[in-house]
Image (spheres, rainbow, N blue to C red):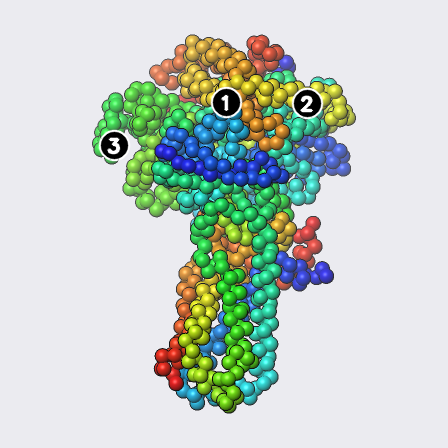
């Protein structure tokens, strides 16, 4: 295969574009996901109606699900390829390294990404496939999303796990928003600071938004 | 030794175009049958190699750095002159020609200098087309500034990094040819000897600095673009690796060495801070556009500069040379600074320094404007001295910067050895006894882009170099000599390092053959250098091995040549019983100003090697001035 | 001043290297870092040992020869400074310093602190130029260029090709170097005719030399002695994708 597409995907920049585009898609996914989740604060009615409405358009739902899975797979596979490539490019470590100028999160995207991947699998197993806590869901109506959440987050360790996981997502995102834009060629001194702040702001909003729910359940604010 | 300048006949302004028409051409298909070796890939070498390759010649280029981009041309800060007259301030080819001849104190060949002024404009066009980001005005046109020794603004610049940008331009042109396979480039390779077959320069012997491999290379012509020999002084503004080896080896093989004593001392360098110092850093002459040079009026005045009131300051350049003021030429500004220091009025811990003060400029233009013009130079100064030049005046002192002397070349840039061409600082040609600021870049690129590529074809067409190979006995013999010499360095096993010898030599040269020279000093220098040379060959210590990378060995080879060359410089300075440009003989002065002797010394001195420990022969190329009148240089 | 040095010593590309310890005497705070090494080397030669090899030449921060990582930072701790312009006054009495060569697979060690940086030259040969033969240029002022663009181009052109960006990058990516050269010419009208071809050609060679991919950590920007901005990398990212997506005709010529 020697087509231009293949060549581009073999190049360092081409691979970065794959990372950036798939990552950006997932950021939009997260924003949508969180907005939906926030309905829980409006009561069982609201969030359950939302969940049911989603299911009324299966084609759309599935298209979105497939896109998300594709984005995830592209992101993960490219990450593995790039990490291998970058490790090969830098085989000998320094005896002393300071890495000045780079943030911790930017240097540890692989690690945070891996944690997030494990979490995504767990999260799907928990709510979508209902494998981790079958006993909690056995007596529930399939569409009672509200009760699913309330019942799940009675356990402190699970709440801790979710908070930790969403915090990892937050760390990952503090780098990824400005990074993906940079990869796509969006960098202008006039707007860089704003982009960086917006990135940090979004990361924190997502963290607070997502983690607030299990915490609120545990504290009895939601019941 | 025959010194035929081969200057074409006819009116000065038409010589070059006439010559270009008269030279024999080689048709494009035949050019690829001719091969050229280019040693050194700074401005002159890179531009020549690229242009000759564009024309179709087979070029093999060498440099001692790992990449052509690192040649010391890169360090030139201030700018490049060109007679564009974009500022409409009365500049012209003739004025640039006149300024250069006058600046060189009438010790350069008229025809060469005129040609230099003519092609100067093409250099700017070529560089801009390559994407060299020169400074521009808001209207989008090129900006100019003024430089020492000139009353017009003809200097093009790219902040304080003009040399870097021009070199990167030439290097990009060279890279293009390397990519196309028309130039074979060898970095980290040093030329250690020239090979002559049947009286023609036919190749070189090199040492690969990474592997230590000694190799023979043959071609139809050899071009030396190996820069100047300022490092004979140990401390200079040259890069650490700059050396005289290539040109000195050529001299030993019969090339005439012209005016070796003509060295330029640059007035604005950062003073020496201690014995450990390995090199001196230049502060661009462009600083003298806005900075004012002064020393205290009182001897031994150790007050901080801010505490010295205006009336107790001696703005000596402005006082002595009112029409040029702080922009007096380099030799004159340097000597004036030295006089102030010799008078006990020097500043700084060592007393070897004068002030270059920007307080007035900051008051007039504001700190931001000054930062925009000179920011990188100010930063560099602060890094080295730990003093903030926005707050207190810079301390400056003269330092060896450029060497006007070099291998003698004719109008075609060919040396006295047939086929050996010499370009850029390595030749003696255009600057006479003093180079004006912003003229080195101009000359290097003029030689490389526009002169040599036109004249070398004539050599091929007329000399018709016969076939030779690296297996010819001359090559084998030269290779063996190089190997023996390296073996010798490795086997002396004495007690002193190459750097120690270098330092001692530099000290002798600076004291006796530096800014001011006299008969007794030069004579004592010659005997001291001879003794030092003897010591060198019996007491040198080089560690490591001859194979592989060995920087101590590299240094030893360079110092060995400097030792012999230093003696030649002193001999040249001794016989030139006059003061002209950068060559100042204490015996020949009038009210502190250099006194030229046109009756006896209006010539180029060309030295011919006679053998180990023998006094070389001095030949003369008389200089005739058809267009300009020999006159006393005055900047008052 | 007394300090302790740990210096990487390696005889040649094939033999393994290791850190050796030295305690240079008489370190003067006004010495440059390289002068401190000079003094140490003089001692070593006198003792009959092989001097420490390190690349250096102009010693005024412009040739880009010097290349050492000092305490984990390319060119040492000072911002916008090459190792040759670093002075010992930046360190304290009793400091312990680790001196290592640039580490990158594409920059193999030649000896001690010297690495092979010729990949940069090969990248340049794949497009780091404007194809204009000597003598064919028009008058320099026939093409006005806005001062802002010329200044921006200059800032990219200030790259000294030292490789600190590669040394600082955890991925050993040379993207800052490549992008500086691409940007210098992409910002100028002279660079437009070959703009797409240049981005393709230089990036391909970058990848072929074994440099890694940019993950936007910005360590390069912080280490760059000429403080070149990663804005240039964004420009390269744009140009490369534009060339890939919309200029198939440059595909073949960029590979020549």
Q: Quadrant of the N terminus of chain B?
A: top right
As measured in the structure, the alpha-carbon distance from the residue carrying label 1 to the one carrying label 2 is 25 Å
Residue under pointer 2: B479
Q: Mark 3 or mark 1, which has the lower sequence index?
A: 3
Q: Residue B304 shows which numbered tag?
A: 3
The nearer-to-camera label among 3 and 2 is 2
- Residue B85: percent from left, percent from top: 48, 38
Res. C163 in view = no
Residue at horizontal 58 percent and vertical 66 percent from the top: A76
The answer to which of C184 and B525 lies nearer the viewer is: B525
Q: Kindly state the secondary structure of the residue where label 1 is placed.
A: loop
Q: Is residue B503 left or right of residue B169?
A: left
The chain that hosts pointer 2 is B
1 and 2 marks on the same chain: yes
Q: Residues within 10 Å of mark 1 (few under 14, many from 20)?
A: many
Residue position for label 1: B497
Instruction: Give the CA distance from mark 3 to mark 1.
Output: 40 Å
């Amino acid at each position: 295969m020697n087509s231009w597409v293949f060549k581009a995907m073999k190049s360092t920049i081409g691979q970065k574009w794959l990372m950036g585009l798939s990552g950006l898609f997932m950021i939009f996914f997260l924003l949508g996901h969180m907005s939906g989740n926030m309905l829980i604060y409006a009561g069982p009615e609201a969030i359950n109606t939302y969940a049911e409405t989603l299911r009324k358009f299966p084609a759309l739902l599935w298209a979105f699900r497939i896109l998300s899975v594709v984005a995830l797979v592209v992101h993960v596979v490219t990450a593995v390829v790039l990490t291998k490539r970058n490790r090969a490019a830098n085989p000998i470590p320094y005896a002393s390294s300071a890495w000045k100028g780079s943030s911790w999160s930017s240097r540890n995207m692989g690690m945070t990404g891996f944690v997030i991947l494990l979490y995504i699998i767990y999260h799907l197993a928990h709510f979508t496939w209902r494998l981790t806590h079958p006993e909690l869901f056995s007596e529930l109506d399939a569409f009672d999303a509200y009760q699913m959440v309330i019942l799940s987050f009675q356990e402190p360790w699970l709440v801790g796990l979710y908070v930790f996981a969403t915090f990892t997502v937050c760390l990952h995102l503090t780098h990824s928003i400005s990074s993906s834009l940079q990869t796509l060629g969006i960098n202008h001194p006039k707007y860089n600071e704003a982009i960086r702040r917006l990135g940090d702001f979004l990361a924190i909003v997502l963290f607070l938004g997502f983690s607030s729910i299990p915490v609120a359940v545990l504290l009895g604010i939601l019941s | 030794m025959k010194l035929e300048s081969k200057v074409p006949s006819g009116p000065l302004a038409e010589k070059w175009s006439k010559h270009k028409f008269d030279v024999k051409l080689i048709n494009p298909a035949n050019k690829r049958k001719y091969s050229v070796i280019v040693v050194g890939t700074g401005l002159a070498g890179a531009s020549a190699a690229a242009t000759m390759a564009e024309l179709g010649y087979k070029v093999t280029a060498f440099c001692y750095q790992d990449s052509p981009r690192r040649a010391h041309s890169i360090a030139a800060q201030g700018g490049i002159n060109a007679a564009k007259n974009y500022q409409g301030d009365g500049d012209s080819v003739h004025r640039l020609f006149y300024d250069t001849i006058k600046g060189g104190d009438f010790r350069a060949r008229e025809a060469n200098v005129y040609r230099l002024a003519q092609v100067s404009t093409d250099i700017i066009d070529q560089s801009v087309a390559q994407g060299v980001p020169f400074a521009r005005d808001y209207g989008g046109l090129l900006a100019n500034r003024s430089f020492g020794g000139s009353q017009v603004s003809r200097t093009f610049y790219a902040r304080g990094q003009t040399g870097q940008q021009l070199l990167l331009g030439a290097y990009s042109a060279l890279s293009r040819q390397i990519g196309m396979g028309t130039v074979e480039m060898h970095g980290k390779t040093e030329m250690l000897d020239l090979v002559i077959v049947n009286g023609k320069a036919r190749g070189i012997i090199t040492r690969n600095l990474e592997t230590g491999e000694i190799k023979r290379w043959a071609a139809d012509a050899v071009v030396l673009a190996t820069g100047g020999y300022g490092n004979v002084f140990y401390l200079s503004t040259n890069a650490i690796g700059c050396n005289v080896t290539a040109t000195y080896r050529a001299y030993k093989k019969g090339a005439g060495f012209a005016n070796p004593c003509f060295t330029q001392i640059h007035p604005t360098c950062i003073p020496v801070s201690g014995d450990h110092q390995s090199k001196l850093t230049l502060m661009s002459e462009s600083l003298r556009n806005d900075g004012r040079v002064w020393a205290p009026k009182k001897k031994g005045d150790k007050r901080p500069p801010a505490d010295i009131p205006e009336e107790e300051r001696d703005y000596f350049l402005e006082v002595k040379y009112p029409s040029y003021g702080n922009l007096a030429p380099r030799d004159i500004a340097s000597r004036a600074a030295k006089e102030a220091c010799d008078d006990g009025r020097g500043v700084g811990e060592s007393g070897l320094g004068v002030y270059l003060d920007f307080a007035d400029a900051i008051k007039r233009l504001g700190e931001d404007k000054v930062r925009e013009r000179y920011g990188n130079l100010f930063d560099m100064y602060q890094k080295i001295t730990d003093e903030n030049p926005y707050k207190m005046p810079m301390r400056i002192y003269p330092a060896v910067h450029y060497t006007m002397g070099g291998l003698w070349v004719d109008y075609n840039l060919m040396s006295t050895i047939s086929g050996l061409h010499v370009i850029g600082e390595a030749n003696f040609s255009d600057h006479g006894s003093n180079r004006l600021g912003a003229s080195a870049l101009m000359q290097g690129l003029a030689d490389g882009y526009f002169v040599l590529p036109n004249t070398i074809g004539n050599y091929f067409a007329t000399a018709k170099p016969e076939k030779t190979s690296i297996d010819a006995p001359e090559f084998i013999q030269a290779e063996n000599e190089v190997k023996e010499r390296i073996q010798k360095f490795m086997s002396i096993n004495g007690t002193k390092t190459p750097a120690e010898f270098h330092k001692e030599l530099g000290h002798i040269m600076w004291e006796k053959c530096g800014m001011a020279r006299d008969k007794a000093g030069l004579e004592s220098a010659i005997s001291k250098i001879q003794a030092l040379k003897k010591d060198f060959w019996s007491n040198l210590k080089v560690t490591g091995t001859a194979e592989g990378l060995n920087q101590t060995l590299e240094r030893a080879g360079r110092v060995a040549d400097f030792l012999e060359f230093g003696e030649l410089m002193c001999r040249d300075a001794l016989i030139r019983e006059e003061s002209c440009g950068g060559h100042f003989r204490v015996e020949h002065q009038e009210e502190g100003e250099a006194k030229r002797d046109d009756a006896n010394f209006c010539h180029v001195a060309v030295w011919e090697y006679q053998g180990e420990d023998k006094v070389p022969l001095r030949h003369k190329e008389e200089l005739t001035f058809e267009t300009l009148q020999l006159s006393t240089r005055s900047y008052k | 001043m007394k300090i302790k040095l740990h210096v990487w010593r390696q005889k040649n590309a094939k033999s393994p290297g290791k850190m050796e310890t030295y305690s240079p005497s008489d370190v003067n705070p006004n010495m440059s870092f390289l002068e401190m090494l000079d003094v140490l080397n003089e001692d070593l030669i006198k003792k009959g040992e092989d001097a420490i090899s390190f690349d250096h030449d102009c010693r005024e921060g412009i040739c880009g020869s010097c290349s050492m990582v000092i305490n984990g930072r390319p060119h040492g701790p000072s911002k916008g400074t090459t190792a040759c312009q670093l002075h010992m006054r930046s360190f304290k009495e009793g400091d312990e310093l680790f001196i290592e060569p640039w580490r990158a697979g594409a920059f193999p060690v030649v000896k001690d602190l010297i690495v092979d940086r010729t990949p940069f030259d090969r990248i340049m040969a794949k497009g780091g130029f404007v194809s204009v033969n000597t003598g064919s240029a028009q008058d320099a002022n026939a093409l006005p260029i806005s001062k802002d663009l010329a200044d921006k181009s200059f800032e990219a052109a200030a790259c000294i090709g030292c490789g600190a960006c590669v040394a600082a990058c955890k991925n050993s990516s040379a993207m800052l170097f490549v992008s500086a050269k691409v940007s210098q010419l992409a910002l100028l009208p002279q660079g437009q005719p070959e703009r797409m071809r240049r981005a393709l050609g230089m990036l391909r060679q970058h990848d072929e030399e074994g440099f890694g991919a940019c993950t936007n950590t910005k360590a390069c920007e912080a280490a760059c002695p000429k403080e070149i901005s990663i804005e240039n990398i964004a420009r390269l990212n744009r140009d490369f994708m534009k060339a890939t997506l919309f200029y198939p005709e440059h595909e073949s010529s960029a590979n020549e």
